Amino acid sequence: MTYENIVKAAKKAIKAVDASIIKEHLAVEFDIEGKGEGAFYVEFKEKEIDVEPYEYYDHDFRVRGEASTILSILNGEVSPCAAQADGKLSVEGNDTKLSLLEEYLKADIKEKKTAKAPAKKVEKKPVPKKVTKKPSAKVGK
């Protein structure tokens, strides 16, 4: 996955987050290591969330990890605190705010889990009609 595709995927994931739940400012720089390496930031501010393909020098904390882990976090599939505990990413800076990032993303996780997938239409196959022959009336001789 290229750096540009990673940033697009991050923007798409963040669009699903409800900005109305933001109670305090949070700026996180994500540094992708390995394939597609580069930096982008996510800034949570009052009723608005920005994702941009730049470093954010005045961030609350910086997260370093592989693209798959970072995108899993932003998609609400993995807890950032659990990923840090598992050693899948490192956090530099005010890591006490990592739980705030988790809170903002968990609100999205709850919505995803409660949203039901649309019911699939099941096409009924036409049942072939049974053809029954009526006994022919025998005409007497």
Image (cartoon, rainbow, N blue to C red):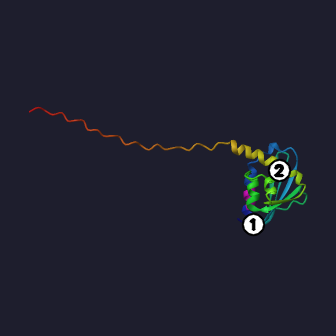
Count of numbered labels shown in the rendering: 2
Q: Amino acid at mark 1?
A: Gly
Residue at the extreme top: 140
Residue at the extreme left: 141
* Range of magenta residues: 6-10
x then y, percent, for residue 96? 89, 51
Residue 100 within the magenta-colored segment of the rendering: no
- Residue drawn at 79 percent across, 56 percent down: 83
Residue 9 within the magenta-colored segment of the rendering: yes
The residue tagged 1 is 36
Q: Are marks 1 and 2 in contact (CB under 8 Å)?
A: no
| Tag 2 secondary structure | helix
Q: Nearer the viewer, residue 140 or 10?
A: 140
Q: CA distance from mark 1 to mark 2?
A: 23 Å
x then y, percent, for residue 27? 86, 54
The residue tagged 2 is 101
As displayed, is residue 103 above or below residue 5? above
Q: Amino acid at mark 2?
A: Leu
Residue 124 located left or right of residue 111:
left
Q: Main secondary structure of the magenta part?
A: helix
- Residue drawn at 76 percent across, 53 percent down: 74
Specify whether residue 30 is in view. Answer: no
x then y, percent, for residue 120? 56, 44
Q: Nearer the viewer, residue 109 or 52?
A: 109
| Tag 1 secondary structure | loop
How packed mark 1 is, by other alpha carbons closer than 10 Å (few <14, some 14-19, many 20 or more), is some
Residue 1 located left or right of residue 134:
right
User: Of label 1 and label 2, which has the lower sequence position?
Assistant: 1
Q: Nearer the viewer, mark 1 or mark 2?
A: 2
